[in-house]
Image: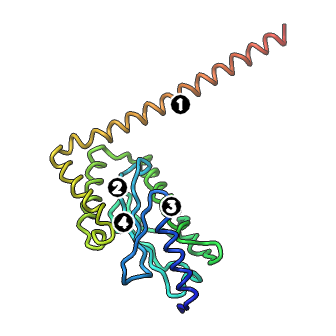
Amino acid sequence: MATPDLENLMEEEFVRLRECPPPNFIVRRLQNYKREWHFLLLGESSFLSTSGNFHGNILLPPDYPNSPPQAINVYTPMDPPIVDMEDSSVYSYLQTWDPNTCSVYVLLVKLSEWITENARQREAYKPAHARTKATQYLQTLNYNSENPVFKELFPEYADIYKAEIEKRKRLGIEQYCLPFEQKRKRDYSLYSLIIVLILTLFLIIMYFVSLARVTFFT
């Protein structure tokens, strides 16, 4: 049951979260729905199967923060999709909710980590082609820019997305694939360099070990 003290705690947490959100997050809410906090997660290169900006919300119960959030929703389509959180750190965090130590801030951090890890596993199992990534990215921009709630809460991003979509349409999908292909090539080059350095270090160590053995026995 909501009380003035709980309402004040919730308001204080929202103000802190709005002013100082987790990295890559923006948190806002509709004026008439104080218990529905919306977030925008700005995708980076860490989202290996797709890059995009993901919109979702967190629903809070009347006795929050004594009880954990009722639901976490991600509206923007993503690949791989969120289908089950029961085995995730997000679910565990909600199940072990402690009002004295837990917060929506940490919950959002865990959500970001879980999405990123899912994307890494998907990429390792079935790497996405550059064209697929480009198409998925444009789909996330289009979905957000057409969502009425998103446009009301994040109007500056809705305008940016529309401009980006028009720009990519003019360039064509092939041109838009170039950054993804270049990133993949950079990643492969980096991995190759690391492997070469490890092998070189191993050979150097083996050389000095052999040299020490020869010196010892002579």
Measured Cα–Cα span from mark 1 to mark 4: 36 Å
Q: Find residue 202 and report its horizontal and vertical position in percent.
A: 64, 24
Q: Amino acid at mark 4?
A: His
Q: Find residue 23 and report its horizontal and vertical position in percent.
A: 49, 57
Q: Residues within 10 Å of mark 1 (few under 14, many from 20)?
A: few
Q: Residue at x 25, y 64 (%)?
A: 145
Q: How is the image coloured?
A: rainbow
Measured Cα–Cα span from mark 3 to mark 4: 15 Å
- Does the residue at mark 1 contact the one at mark 4 (Cβ under 8 Å)? no
Q: Amino acid at mark 2?
A: Gly
Q: Find residue 216 and report its horizontal and vertical position in percent.
A: 84, 13
Check disc 2 and report the residue beneath it.
52
Check disc 1 and report the residue beneath it.
194
Marked residue nearer the N-terminal end (3 or 2): 3
Q: Residue at x 42, y 64 (%)?
A: 26
Q: Secondary structure at mark 3?
A: loop
Q: Where is residue 76, by image quadrant?
A: bottom left
Check disc 4 and report the residue beneath it.
55
